[in-house]
Image (cartoon, helix red, strand yellow):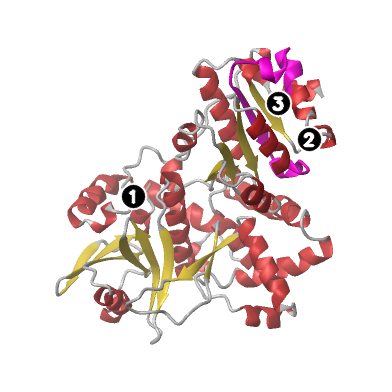
Amino acid sequence: MEDIISLQNPWKRGQPALAGKILPRKILPLIEAWLDEPEIIVIKGARQTGKTTIQYHLIDQLLQRGVKPENVFYFLLDNLTLQQRFSEHPYVLKQTIEKFLGQPLEKHGQRIYLFLDEIQKLRQFSTQVKEYFDLFPNMKFILSGSSILQASASISESLRGRTISFTVTPFSLGEVMPHIPACTLANLQDWETIQQHHAATLPHKSEILLHLNQHLVFGSMPRIHLSQTDSQRQMRLAEYIDTFMRKDIIETLRVAKFLDFEKLLRLLSFQVGNVVNISELATRTQLSTETIRKYLTLGEEAFIFQFVAPFFSNKRKSLVKDRKIYFEDLGIRNHLAGQDSLNLLNHPDLGGEAENFVHITLGKYGENNKHRFREYFFKSYRGQEVDFIIEMNGDLIPIEVKYQNQLRRRDYDHLLMFMEDFDLNKGLLVTKDLFDRRMFDDRGVILVPLWLFATIV
């Protein structure tokens, strides 16, 4: 076991924690700020979104700050030997650390940083972590799991009030193009500011469109994005879905049931941006409504897709109680739907993909900035719908997506209706390439091209 630990902890052998450069991730400074706080850091996210790389980066930062190498431990619990040994008895982990320290933890006056990767692999991990957290205040835990299928419940129940959580998403456009001018969501609502941003960003438009089209087709999982050719991206995307995604799900479901789950996923891939009707899904898949609900929860916990709830208020209450669905990565969605053509013009639901991309961009913006805004959609009793309602800092930001370059007066109707009903004088309409501001009495609708919207960070 010592050989395994030595390989996973190269800094204990005088080697660097990181080999080579990594793309700067927006979420890193947010996590780093909590390294000296008592809370247990929980790093969540889908497989291969870069969680392990982020942990090694955090370790590198600790070492650069002067933390002694012997006080930093990283255990990848995907390793069967480590799984078995640490699951034998709660204090095997303590004994292992003490062996490397050369003294009991109780006598070690310095802080220990303990990174536990793929934490859900460790049996009854939450009980162990809670006990160590309560007994050894000098131990700082950083937990990570590629799928928190079983872990979420354990973390919320046993470690309530002791954790701070971060979700690592696939790359944003701002992360793969850090030299591109960036703006905030609030900037998009200010006409003067967005005009300046548009002028500064325009010289980079062709580069942004290149990456945007790649994200619309293949998504932005790090390994897939960093592939050199489109054929490599296609092969790695198929491998990701067939191997890693299956592995996460099969850990919870039997293989036979995975086929039912996959059938549901393929059906959902054609419903992006639409309200999910559980009864209809049950009929079309020949599964019970209880099973459908279970699988929908599972898919959301595995970071495959996400639901957006309807917006309610005292002034007007939407009658729609079901939620809309969006996939967390368009590459996965397109592969499941069989719509992974390299030519976007061959995608029959390009408007839906653009809307899904807006949802993904909003999610990354919120997570990477810790803007705890809430994302909704709106549908009135008359059937008038607005794609996104963002509630942030007490304000409402309505966003409609029309991925086209020709707009008619009626394309603004639902957005203007919402703005009038909720006394708002600003709204956003995401287009294909139109950039303008249209005034309707005292209400302004800013038209933002999707490539420009993608630069919010």
Identify the residue at the far left of this view. Answer: 441
* Amino acid, disc 3: Gln
In terms of depth relative to the viewer, which is nearer, 145 or 347?
145
- x and y percentages locating residue 133 in the rendered image: 64, 33
Q: Is residue 164 left or right of residue 361?
A: right
Q: Nearer the viewer, mark 3 or mark 1?
A: 3
- x and y percentages locating residue 252 in the rendered image: 76, 57
- Residue 393's place in the image compared with 317, above or below, is above
Q: Which mark is residue 244?
A: none
Identify the residue at the far bottom of this view. Answer: 382
For residue 106: magenta? Answer: yes
- x and y percentages locating residue 278 in the rendered image: 63, 78
Residue 452 seen by the camera: yes
- x and y percentages locating residue 456 in the rendered image: 36, 50
Q: Are marks 2 and 3 in contact (CB under 8 Å)?
A: yes
Badge 2 or badge 3: first in the primary sequence: 3
* Amino acid, disc 1: Lys
Q: Quadrant of residue 88?
A: top right
- Residue 92's place in the image compared with 71, above or below, is below
Q: Which residues are magenta?
A: 97-125
- Helix, strand, or loop for circle 1? helix
Report which residue position mark 1 lands on: 205
Report which residue position mark 2 lands on: 79
The residue sitting at 44% across, 45% down in the picture is 368
Report which residue position mark 3 lands on: 8
The residue sitting at 68% across, 55% down in the picture is 241
Residue 340 seen by the camera: no
Total marks in image:
3
